Amino acid sequence: MSRLKDKYAIVTGAAQGQGAAIARAFVAEGARVALADIADEAGEALAADLGDAAHFSHHDVSDAQSWQRVVAEAEERFGTPANVLVNNAGILRFGEVDTMPMDEFDLLVAVNMRGCFLGMQAVAPGMKAGRQGSIINCSSVEGLAGMSSLAAYTGTKFAIRGMTKAAAVELGAFNIRVNSVHPGMVDTPMTRVHGGDAAMEWAATRIPLERVGTPEDIAPLYVHLAGDESSYTTGGEFAIDGGATATHSFYPGNSGRGGR
């Protein structure tokens, strides 16, 4: 398949979970992909599995110099500047407003918010020169509404949503599109560490589709936004959450209506 023919993508947080699924979907649709992550072993293994269309780069998204190296390395491998960026890397930390340790808050800001901004900053010159590009920033349903014990995380995800819109306005004249994706509960290593199967089962009762999402549910939206079929789409925010944001906190959960 060739929906992403002539697309050269950098995907952060690509070694596992949602990022790995996005990278696999991109390669399957004809893109070449730089897999950027701090998880060297998993990233190298994925690159080997994907073959010549992918390579792995060790990358700390909170470090501006690391971004410059990854972008330059991708251009050398691709023979052209990257024209797709997926700012997927992120971390999740719980903490109430009055007890959240500031080092945890600062880490969330560094990875989720600063990492996203640095990514856009690093790829913009090459995309401007080529007068094309698609930047896809991973926010969250917590970038659309708040949740108890997630004030700091929610703040970073709202920031991604806002930066996306401002960047879309700024870069539109260069035919660079910037959109945000807002996944709901997705079964990944990042979410499983906070409660395992029990957390997944509870979350499913709070979702209209009555199941937690998978990385493979999320990846096709990134394919659409990376490709030319979304050429008139910028500044958008795309919830992909099983209907979680279609309702509100009074949603009763699984009442047996669907037989599950």
Image: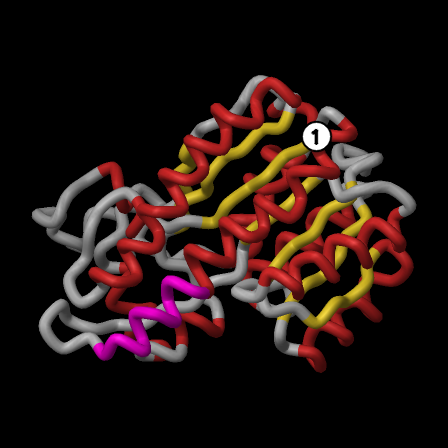
x 76%, y 36%: residue: 4
**Quarter of the figure with residue 41:** bottom right
Closest to the observer, 207 or 172: 172
The residue at which mark 1 appears reads as 128
Image position of 222 with respect to 260: above or below = above
Q: Residues within 10 Å of mark 1 (few under 14, many from 20)?
A: some
Residue 38 location in percent, x, y? Answer: 62, 74
**Number of marks in the rendered image:** 1
The answer to whether residue 136 is left or right of residue 45 is left
**Quarter of the figure with residue 194:** bottom left
Image position of 255 with respect to 126: above or below = below
| Secondary structure beneath label 1 | helix
Q: Where the N terminus falls, by quadrant?
A: top right
- In the rendered structure, does residue 108 fall within the stretch colored magenta? yes
Residue range corresponding to the magenta coloring: 101-110
x 30%, y 70%: residue: 105
Image position of 165 with respect to 138: above or below = above
Closest to the observer, 117 or 200: 117
Q: Where the C terminus falls, by quadrant?
A: bottom left
x 70%, y 57%: residue: 68
Dominant secondary structure (helix, strand or loop) of the stretch shown in magenta: helix
Residue placed furthest toward the front = 65
Image position of 199 with respect to 227: above or below = below
The answer to whether residue 253 is left or right of residue 63 is left
Residue 181 location in percent, x, y? Answer: 46, 42
Amino acid type at image mark 1? Lys
Closest to the observer, 144 or 22: 144
Residue 20 location in percent, x, y? Answer: 64, 62
The answer to whether residue 206 is left or right of residue 124 is left
x 50%, y 35%: residue: 179
Residue 51 location in percent, x, y? Answer: 87, 62
Closest to the observer, 73 or 125: 125
